[in-house]
Image (cartoon, helix red, strand yellow):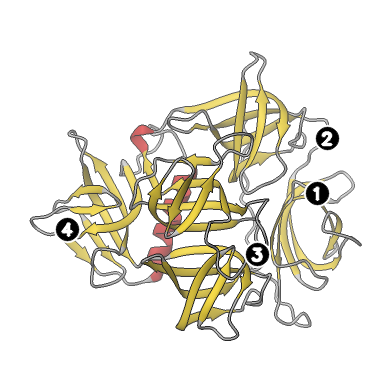
């Protein structure tokens, strides 16, 4: 078996981003592109392969041969580390590993900091979850303060139910609590991911969206929120106060994907923006579809805004063993509100609404309108900070923002704009 020692973090980042992008929404039908693998997943190494013993990762047994590549981003390779796997299905249903990328455990939690010690070592409570910091824990304040009521991210390991932070970073305001880690327990009403209990809604419009079949040992990614009836969070929480809005298992089997779906219809209902947003579309054949809009769903609003009573064309996929439709592209064909060309903006925030965040902003010399559907990310808006975003350019020259990110500079007197990456041009679905 060929072994390569590649210790560069860039390789790891590329591998993880590729897995995340593929796990959210398939990029194309299986026949449209040859990706070189049938199955791709991330999981905990339970058995390290040898000449006489197969690898077991995330509950999956992996055959290897002379073409299998093992990439070691950390050494020694032992059970308990994490691995990203690309494999081919064999005629007998087994998996032949094409590549196994071994890496350190990196459970992650993003949320609002509710309590912390005076120094670094001690108990930090993030979104109701207790995280232990040590003298070796690294911190970063580049994107804000590590203060109570501020958003932070902890990069952690878990052992015996205790989460220990290797890094705690200020990240600026986010639109969701997120959790990534090892699936340790699966029940109808909850999952446990790296010792963090995530409650699951099983009924109603707020039902938790679950993508993929959970298996103990696989890695899962979750978007979550605090339960509405939760009391103010103490420094230690016995029962989880987190409820998952979306759960995604990091396992993609291209051979099991359902075929793509396409249809036209009228939008009859639409949720207020959440990390995972849904719309209800009624077709002329009186079929009703609940369509999930992910952060990477392409939405074309040149002919009108996406809203109730708009006529839309939807392209996407039906999740295996589910009636949920994940939209890869939505094109507005007709709408009660005019649309426009997509435009991007960036600049210093010069004016904000008198109250709240909804209303008219001045970003540089550009008038930007923020409404309930705008996805606001980053730091708390302040005059003098920088903002970057995109949206629909209206007839009066203003831009109705679909997404806006605020960057909080350390010194508002000296502001450096973030890097500028224009959005690529794309062709809408006819």
Identify whether 188 is placed above or below 110: above
Q: Nearer the viewer, mark 4 or mark 3?
A: 4
Identify whether 108 is placed above or below 267: below
Q: CA distance from mark 2 to mark 4?
A: 59 Å
Numbered mark located on residue 371 in the image: 1
Residue on which disc 2 sits: 337
Q: Nearer the viewer, mark 1 or mark 2?
A: 1
Q: CA distance from mark 4 to mark 3?
A: 45 Å
* Residue 206 seen from this side: yes
Q: CA distance from mark 3 to mark 2?
A: 30 Å
Decide which of tag 4 and tag 3 comes sooner along the chain.
4
Taking the image as shown, residue 126 lies to the left or right of residue 78, namely right
Q: Using a 10 Å C-alpha cutoff, classify the residue at mark 2 as few (fewer than 14 neighbours), some (14 to 19) or many (20 or more).
A: few
Decide which of tag 1 and tag 2 comes sooner along the chain.
2
* Callout 1 secondary element: loop
Identify which residue is drawn at 59% across, 37% down. 292
Q: CA distance from mark 3 to mark 1?
A: 24 Å
* Callout 4 secondary element: loop
Q: Position of residue 255 (x, y in %)?
A: 34, 34
Q: CA distance from mark 1 to mark 2?
A: 14 Å
The one nearer the camera, 252 or 113, is 113
Q: Using a 10 Å C-alpha cutoff, classify the residue at mark 4 as few (fewer than 14 neighbours), some (14 to 19) or many (20 or more).
A: some
Decide which of tag 3 and tag 2 comes sooner along the chain.
2
* Residue 430 seen from this side: no
* Callout 3 secondary element: loop
Residue on which disc 3 sits: 420
Q: Using a 10 Å C-alpha cutoff, classify the residue at mark 1 as few (fewer than 14 neighbours), some (14 to 19) or many (20 or more).
A: some
Query: To which quarter of the image does residue 257 belong?
Result: top left
Q: Are marks 1 and 4 in contact (CB under 8 Å)?
A: no
Q: Are marks 4 and 3 in contact (CB under 8 Å)?
A: no
Q: CA distance from mark 1 to mark 4?
A: 54 Å
The one nearer the camera, 395 or 129, is 129
């Amino acid at each position: 078996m060929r072994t390569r020692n590649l210790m560069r973090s860039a390789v790891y980042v590329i591998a993880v981003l590729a897995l995340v992008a593929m796990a959210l929404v398939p990029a194309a039908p299986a026949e449209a592109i040859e990706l070189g693998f049938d199955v791709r997943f991330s999981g905990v190494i339970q058995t390290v392969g040898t000449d006489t013993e197969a690898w077991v990762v995330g509950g999956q047994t992996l055959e290897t041969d002379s073409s299998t590549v093992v990439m070691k981003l950390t050494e020694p390779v032992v059970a308990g580390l994490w691995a990203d796997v690309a494999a081919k299905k064999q005629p007998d249903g087994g998996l032949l590993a094409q590549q196994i990328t071994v890496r350190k455990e990196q459970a992650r939690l993003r949320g609002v900091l509710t309590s912390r010690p005076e120094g670094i070592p001690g108990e930090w409570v993030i979104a109701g979850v207790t995280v232990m910091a040590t003298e070796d824990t690294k911190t970063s304040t580049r994107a804000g303060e590590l203060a109570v009521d501020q958003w932070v991210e902890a990069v952690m390991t878990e052992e015996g139910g205790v989460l220990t932070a290797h890094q705690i970073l200020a990240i600026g305001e986010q639109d969701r609590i997120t959790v990534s880690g090892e699936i340790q327990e699966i029940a109808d009403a909850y999952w446990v991911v790296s010792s963090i209990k995530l409650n699951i809604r099983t009924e109603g419009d707020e039902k938790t969206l679950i993508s993929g079949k959970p298996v103990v040992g696989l890695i899962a990614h979750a978007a979550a929120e605090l339960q509405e009836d939760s009391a103010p969070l103490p420094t230690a929480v016995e029962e989880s106060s987190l409820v998952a809005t979306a759960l995604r298992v990091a396992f993609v089997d291209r051979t099991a994907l359902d075929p793509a779906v396409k249809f036209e219809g009228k939008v009859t209902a639409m949720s207020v923006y959440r990390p995972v947003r849904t719309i209800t579309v009624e077709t002329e054949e009186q079929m009703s579809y609940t369509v999930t809009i992910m952060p990477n769903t392409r939405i074309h609003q040149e002919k009108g805004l996406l809203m109730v009573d708009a006529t839309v064309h939807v392209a996407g996929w039906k999740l295996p063993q589910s009636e949920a439709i994940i939209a890869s592209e939505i094109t507005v064909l007709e709408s009660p509100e005019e649309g426009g060309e997509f435009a991007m903006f960036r600049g210093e925030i010069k004016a904000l609404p008198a109250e709240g965040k909804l209303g008219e902003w001045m970003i540089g010399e550009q008038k930007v309108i923020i409404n309930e559907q705008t996805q606001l990310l980053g730091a708390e808006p302040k005059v003098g900070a920088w903002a970057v975003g995109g949206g629909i350019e209206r007839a009066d020259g203003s831009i109705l923002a679909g997404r806006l990110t605020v960057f909080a500079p350390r010194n508002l007197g000296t502001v450096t704009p973030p890097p500028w990456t224009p959005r690529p041009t794309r062709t809408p679905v006819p």
